[in-house]
Every structure is written in C-alpha cells, then in structure tokens.
Amino acid sequence: MVREAAGAGAREGFCCVAEEQTSGRGRSGRRWLAPAGSALLMSLLLRRRPEVAAAVPLLTGLAVADAVAGLTGVSCRLKWPNDVLAGSAKLAGILTEVEAGGGIILGLGVNLTVPAFPADVAGVSLDRLAGAAYGWEAFLTTLLPELHRRLQQVEAGGIGSLRADWTARAAGLGGPVRAQLGASTVEGTALGIDDDGALLVDTVDGPVRLVAGEVHLLTTQDG
C-alpha cells in the first residue's frame, strides 16, 4: 500500500501499520511473521535526498534504541546495518527500499509482546525486557519524535554525524565478522562505519568497505 501511495505522489509521512504479519518480507527475502497484536509492524514513506536515504537504516536503529531507552531504561545494541538487539537477541528489524520516484519506504518490525520464537530464531520481546507490556500505539508515539530528530541530524550533518552515537551502541566492533555478499564471503575484524555508512572490515588482504550484505557476528551469534 505504501509503495502504491508513493507512486501516486503521497507526501512524506504516509504510514501503514499492520495488526499482524503472515507474509511479510525481511532482509535477503526471508519471511517476516508476527502474531496478531504482538508487534509494531509499520511501513513509512519518506521523501529525502539520496544521501539521506543511505542513512535511513542506521538512523532508524538509533531512533528505536532511543525510544526503547526512553520507555523502559533498557539499552539496546545495533547490528550493522539493520537490526536492533537486546543482548544477542533480535528485538527489531529494519528494511528500506528506494522507489523510482524518489520515495523511501521504511519498513520496521519491533517485537512487543511476542509469546514465543521458533527454536532457530534468537528473538526477544520488549515486554520481557521491560517487565511491562507496551502496545504499538505507545511505542510509535515515542518512536516518531526520535525518528524525526535523527532525520534532522543527518540532513544537517550527513551520515558521519551519526557515527559516534552508532558506535557507542554497535554490536561486534573489534570482533570477528563474516559477511555474505551473494556468492562471496568476507571475513575479518569489524572496525566501524565510514562517513557513508559502509561497514569497515579489516581482512588478511587489507581493509574492505561493505555497503550491503548479510553480516554474522561470530563472537555473539551466527546470524
């Protein structure tokens, strides 16, 4: 629906929230499912410059972490480029797509009251972290000002303006990582992010910049 709205010229801020997700799509084409009433499942249309679009996964992760901390006092970590973790378990996932007409579709899923996760999924729900249940309306009300603030930060200072805050919350920096780039694999030590949001990895063949890919933190989790 948001994609169609973007193509029809909808303004920034057009948003759809789903009560449940039975056929959603996550990163790398994975299925993204959520029982009814258990998560914030939203798609939001942004209209920003291309250089801002590249920052959306990073700034959204920071906005989610800020919102969680504001509501609960719980500190989250960020896994490049698009996951929000509590410990080594995934609390939220981000997926962005840039449309031909210039719109950026931000997809976000936050586990709020998920009763259980499949055995092969390292997931966590906000109610278990906070000791209290938050509905999607309460979380979204807290999230949107944080998202606006981070967008304004990038508009004013570029992706590099996020680096200090992102690094302070980053999972896996200084440790071994494996990145899957199609049929290619890159292994090395995660160093940080560049001014364009790329992940810097020190390999035996020298430094590598990753602008996309499936990154595995080998010291904390495999996935």
Image (cartoon, grey):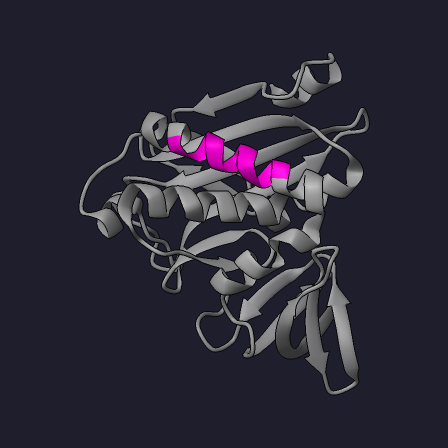
The residue sitting at the front extreme is 156
Q: Residue at x 77, y 34 (%)?
A: 49
At 27% from the left and 39% from the top, the residue drawn is 113
Instruction: Report which quarter residue 110 is drawn in.
Output: top left
Task: Residue 74 in the image: state x and y as whole percent.
Answer: 31, 53
Residue 122 within the segment the image draws in magenta:
no
Q: Is residue 79 visible?
A: yes
Look at 63% across and 74% down and name the residue there.
Answer: 191
Q: Residue furthest bottom?
A: 204
Report the span colored magenta: 142-152
The vertical placement of 212 against 145, above or below, is: below
Name above or below for residue 11 compared with residue 62.
above
- Image: 172 above or below 166: below
Q: Is residue 93 left or right of residue 125?
A: right
> In which quadrant is the N terminus drawn?
top right
Instruction: Give the image quarter of residue 152.
Output: top right
Residue closest to the far left: 131
Disc tally is 0
Instruction: Using the rendered view, name the quadrant where residue 209 is placed.
Output: bottom right
The image position of residue 144, as x and y in percent, is 47, 30
Residue positioned 31% across, 47% down in the render: 125
Give whichever of 60, 112 is nearer the camera.
60
Q: Where does residue 16 sit, x and y in percent of width and height? A: 51, 21
